[in-house]
Amino acid sequence: MEQIKSYLSLQESVGKVLIVGDGQWEDTLARYLQRSGKAAGICRLTQQERENLRNAAAQQSTAAGQERLTQQNLLTLQNLAAERQIESIVFGPGWVEGLKCLTGIRLRYLIGQIGQGEDYFGLWESFSVQAEHICIVRERPCVQGRDAERREVLEWNRRETPVELSVIIPVYNVRPYLEQCIRSLTAWKASYVEYLFVDDGSTDGCDGLLEAWAAQDGRIRHIRKENGGCASARNLGLESAVGNYVGFVDGDDFVDKKMFRMLLQRAMMGRYEMAYCGFSEYHEGEQRTVAVRGECMQEPYLSGTRAAEDVQRLVIRTKVAIWRCLYRREFLLREGIVFHEELKRFDDLPFKVESGFLAKSVVCVPEHLYYYRIGRPGQDVACTDERLFVHFDIFALLDARIMPMKNRRLLDYLQIVKLHTHGYALSRIDRKYYRAYLRKARVQLDRSAGFLRTLCLMLVYGGRGNMGWYFLSSFMKRGKAKVSTGPENTKS
Amino acid sequence: MEARITFVIPAYNAEKTLERTLDSILWQTDGRYRVVIVDDGSTDRTGQIGKGYAMRHPDRIRYIYQENKRQGGARNTGLRSVETAYVSFLDSDDWLMPEYVERITGALDAAREAPEIIMTLPVIYHEQSHGVRDWYDKELFERIFPADGTVVDPARELRLYQFEVNICRKVLQMDFVRRTGFSFREKMKWEDVYPHFYLLSRCRLCMGISTGFYYRIGEGTQTTACTGSERLEILQVFDDLERFLEQEEESLIFPVMRVIVRFAFWCICMADLETREVLVRRVQNFFGRLPGRYRRILLRECIRQYCLKDAVQYALLTAALRYRFCGLIFYDYLPQEICERFFKKILRAQKRVS
């Protein structure tokens, strides 16, 4: 109720209103609308109409009943709105299913509160074609997360474009897997999504395949560009996206049919800046999937959190997996987060760190919905040579961004990310590069935290496996490393 | 219809939110109000918007421009041009509930004696999520003012001082303002902390009405969200409060000290690395200067009025602020976290044994 009042206080008037609700709720709201002068007129349902609406809802929920829903019944419902020239509807808990039957009327405002477990997203889906403004409130009896919102709200205003979600798929020579990717994405038949396939100058015939699909499915946009690396493809996608939310999918992976619906549904209720789900690894050789556990799929993230520490901690608790996230486009624009095109690989690492550090709210969908293909030849993560030196460029960029914020916690988290990344690189790099890498790594680590502090961080936040090489690097001459001409060129 | 209340709106570079604020006033159900917009040397479209509204509603809205004097200076300018019996301050990013004026004038008509301060109950609006939350002291408010129009005397009801220090929630009687010679301190931040105590200590009739404005948080542009050297200005407020305590009665020591401790802790938490060190040092100096009597009273009252937990928390905090070596924990969250983990481990091990 409080939330609806605040929404109404920001509107001049909602015109002639139909109130659909039960007993006391309806009375209180009607009184408020009258007193506050926000409604030009108020009408309510008669007992008969209530019954009709309830029956229609009950019938619609059963598959067979949908046909039995007589023409007569529907007509009276639609007349009900048309006859009284209703401009807006305000509804209370328990009426979502009933309202879904009221299709085909134009509305200015649809405002209401839902009860536990009601399908608000279905309501939004059916009314986003008919209404100008939608505001659906959900009150939660108790929340676990620190600083979590007890009242969540889905606010939506009509824009010129119906697109709500843009999915960006950079494509580069993944012809054998692309078909599966497109199929899994387009299996979801929503009209408010666009798929931006950015073809980064593929040479293996991805082109033709995308062309054919784009002709079949109007939601697919095929963007061609000169080859310029994954980062530039993603950036081009970001620039052309128009949805309120953006997601990323890699051309060689595939998703669950309901992935983006669930993410969007969760992110919109409460205007979260980031939403993520779990993912599974798909082993190419053995053709089996393994759900990845322990990726922050617990409280406080499940009920959504706005506490800075919890949001930022995600960066050190999860793997680099930007494709499992949905980002609010407004947030990326506000913070100026883009992919760094000068990096030829691992461009998602700085993106993940920056978005994780700067996001103000995040929520998790506790299901494994993305399938990450591993073990295909030519994959980015598989290299063991001097290409791994790109990590130093990445962290130089991140240092420049995070250091001026002068926040101890962020610096520490950045240090942990560095430790993990360098530890990973050292575990797989060829022997001949080991010394050079280690020396550079230590110089970079010393920039954001001292020896003792780093030790504490390793103890507190795990990563104890990194202690070995960290100690080892203490015995190296580090002064020389600054001027050393280690393999700088990472473009090879 | 005679206007009863004037809204003073200091506006500094508020082009994004000012329209919302002004609209919410124009949409009031009761028209007995005036508005004074004080443009505090804005460099964006604020002036244009303000002038536009003043032109369209010349009988109700006035627009004043001045060189930048910060919020306190702008409020003083507005205060000088008030002609109605009551004045209410409203920030340029907040907005009113639709029946605000109606409820206040209604309560004033019904009151036997005109109240000097009217306390209202705002609602918090989170700009990121668009969700609303209850005001920080809603429970206390409802306990002190069980019904609209309840009048209490702050000298008898000391819990009034425990309210959130916020000037916008207080509607002030102009006679009362003139009599006490009240004005804001200019050219500094946190200018509404000191007036909270100053006004309440001189007020005899305080009325409560459970309507208010929407208080916007979460955008990161307000005074309360800054992290840099602006934080240091809080020390000036502490000095003011200390001087205030010397003149006032014993009974005020507890609420004032509480606010000081809370503000100190909160400011340190919010400040960035460089500011934090300076801030901790200065706060320590300040606490070292305070008479020990104040601290004892604070602790005693804590134990008397609250559970032991609060008292322990305050004791630790004041001790840490007072003694130099304890101050180290403020520079860094890491020792805290390590201790926490350590204790948790011990607890878990104990559980396993038992």
Image (tube, coloured by chain):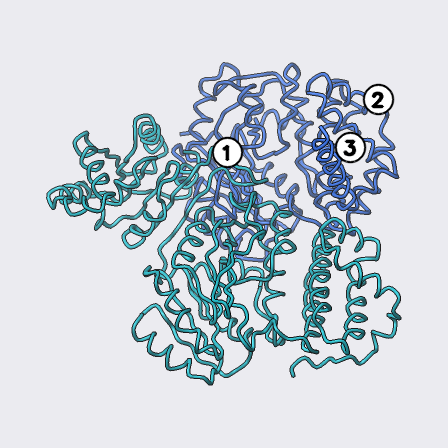
Chain colours: A cyan, B blue
The mark lying in front, picked from 1 and 2, is 1
- The answer to whether B200 is drawn above or below residue A103 in the figure is above
Q: Would you call the spot at circle 1 few (<14 residues within 10 Å), some (14-19), or many (20 or more)?
A: few
Q: Secondary structure at mark 2?
A: helix
Residue at 50 percent across and 46 percent down: it is B129
Q: CA distance from mark 1 to mark 2?
A: 42 Å
Q: CA distance from mark 3 to mark 2?
A: 16 Å
The type of residue carrying mark 1 is Cys
Residue at 66 percent across and 24 percent down: it is B161
Q: Name the image quarter holding residue B186.
A: top right
Q: Dot 3 corresponds to which residue? A: B317
Report x, y in % for residue A286. 50, 67
Report x, y in % for residue B182. 67, 30
The mark lying in front, picked from 3 and 2, is 3
Q: Secondary structure at mark 3?
A: helix
On the picture, is A289 further left or further right than A318?
Answer: left
Q: CA distance from mark 3 to mark 1?
A: 30 Å
- The answer to whether A326 is drawn above or below residue B342 in the figure is below
Q: Chain of mark 1?
A: A
Q: Dot 1 corresponds to which residue? A: A142
Q: Secondary structure at mark 1?
A: loop
The mark lying in front, picked from 3 and 1, is 1
In the image shown, does B312 or A129 lie closer to the viewer? B312
